[in-house]
Image: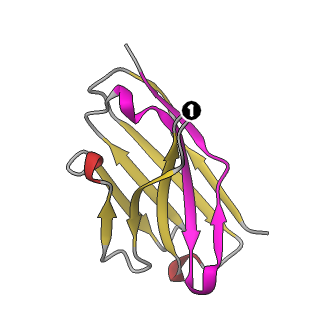
Amino acid sequence: QVQLVESGGGLVQPGGSLRLSCAASGFTFSVYTMSWYRQAPGKERELVASISSGGGITNYKDSVKGRFTISRDNAKNMVDLQMNSLKPEDTAVYYCKATRAMGVAYWGQGTQVTVSS
């Protein structure tokens, strides 16, 4: 069955770094656009970064540009999110999403990122 399993979340001090990983299985990973979303308490889920199926096109939320980097390895069915210079406002549950045309989409279960001193 389809699975997206996130890992790498945790507690980090402001200015620190974390690397989130998402392991995919059960579908043809290499033809899907992959994205990272986040949802803070009391707020709507928002798109943080996305990467095209081949990895050549990336997009970022303005507030994370220059700090976060999304990457993928189609041979390993993995997508990562490197997060540097973390701020308290980056605190949220981070979700991995796989999207294809015609509305096909899969979500992971999420991983908590807390930025606090």
Residue 95 in magenta stretch? yes
Q: Quadrant of the C terminus?
A: top left
Q: Residue at x 47, y 56 (%)?
A: 36
Residue 32 vertical position relative to residue 73 in the rendered view, above or below: below
Q: Quadrant of the N terminus?
A: bottom right
Q: Amino acid at mark 1?
A: Pro
Residue 46: image x %, image y %? 47, 52
Residue 18 in magenta stretch? no
Return the residue at label 1. Answer: 41
Residue 57 vertical position relative to residue 89 in the rendered view, above or below: below
Residue 94: image x %, image y %? 52, 45
Q: Residue at x 67, y 67 (%)?
A: 25
- Relative to residue 77, is residue 55 drawn left or right? left
Q: Quadrant of residue 54?
A: bottom left
Question: Dot 1: few (<14), some (14–19), or many (≥20) neighbours within 10 Å?
Answer: few
Residue 79 vertical position relative to residue 103 in the rendered view, above or below: above
Residue 34: image x %, image y %? 49, 68
Q: Residue at x 56, y 80 (%)?
A: 100
Span shown in magenta: 88-115
Q: Residue furthest right?
A: 1
Residue 12 vertical position relative to residue 18 in the rendered view, above or below: above
Front residue of this view, candidates 36 and 72: 36
Front residue of this view, candidates 36 and 76: 36
Q: Residue at x 59, y 58 (%)?
A: 23
Q: Quadrant of residue 3?
A: bottom right
Residue 15: image x %, image y %? 26, 26
Disc 1 is placed on an element classified as loop
